[in-house]
Amino acid sequence: MLAIGRPGGNGAMSFISLQRLSAIASAILLPATLHAALPTPAEAPERSFLTGQLLIASPSMGDPRFLQTVILMVQHDRNGALGIVINRPVGDRPLARLLEALGEKDPGVAGTVRILAGGPVQPDIGFVLHSADYHRPDTVEIDGHVAMTSSREILRDIANQRGPKKSLIAFGYAGWAPGQLEGEIAHGFWFTTPQDENLVFDDNRDDLWDHAMKRRTQDL
């Protein structure tokens, strides 16, 4: 798993590639990919982990790919960590175009979905973050308010008004090796704050880092 927080690589190219909608949509929402990416759950926690919390890049962040980023921690334990950047918007895309790229053309579908650049690891794989009112067998429950689903069926449900009340699609993710995130926090590269559903799904992505910074802590 590629670890973030290290200089190098071309994060900008990953973000630009997300705009090739027809290309990336064909790779969206693969359950096997999601579960392979998640760290293997530890049998018993040994410390306070950050699953469900927000990770906020501090002003001293040295990696330009993660300047002023806010990351929703999907999973964190002694085997590693995985999170989704939630304040790197690519834009809103017509839901009908996403479904068409998946071979499910439906002229009656209306509306748009929000697309984010979720991180530099596997930037052509999509994940849907959504409110916890929606659940499928492959849904990852992050906490009682936010979940993540990695099946194409969720797009069909959103299109047919059977999906979650709130959702966004992120391509790519951020990952850490065991103990790496703890070290980066100790060096002052990240702050943390409890997850807030309003922040995760806020329409205003531009000010999200500022709002999260006002709530920050630094203790792990």
Image: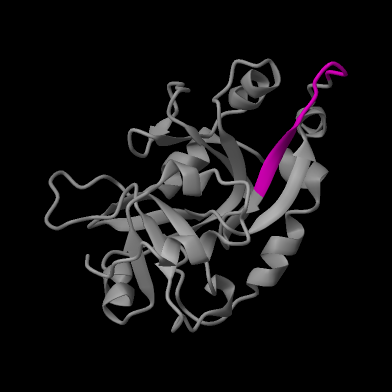
Is residue 107 magenta-colored? yes
Q: Hey, which residue is sitting farthest right in the picture?
A: 107
Residue placed most toward the observer, 94 or 153: 94
Residue placed most toward the observer, 37 or 189: 189
Is residue 203 magenta-colored? no
Q: Is residue 59 above or below residue 78?
A: below
What residue is drawn where x is 57% and y is 63%? 120
On the picture, is 75 further left or further right than 163? left
Residue placed most toward the observer, 112 or 199: 199
Image quadrant holding the N terminus, namely bottom left
Q: Is residue 179 above or below residue 170?
A: below
What residue is drawn where x is 38% and y is 64%? 176
Residue 114: % across, % down: 68, 42
What residue is drawn where x is 43% and y is 29%? 132
Residue 142: % across, % down: 36, 39
What residue is drawn where x is 44% and y is 29%? 139
On the picture, is 27 further left or further right than 20? left
In magenta, the rendered stretch is 106-115
- Judged by its main secondary structure, the magenta piece is loop
Q: Quadrant of residue 140?
A: top left
Q: Is residue 77 above or below residue 138?
A: below
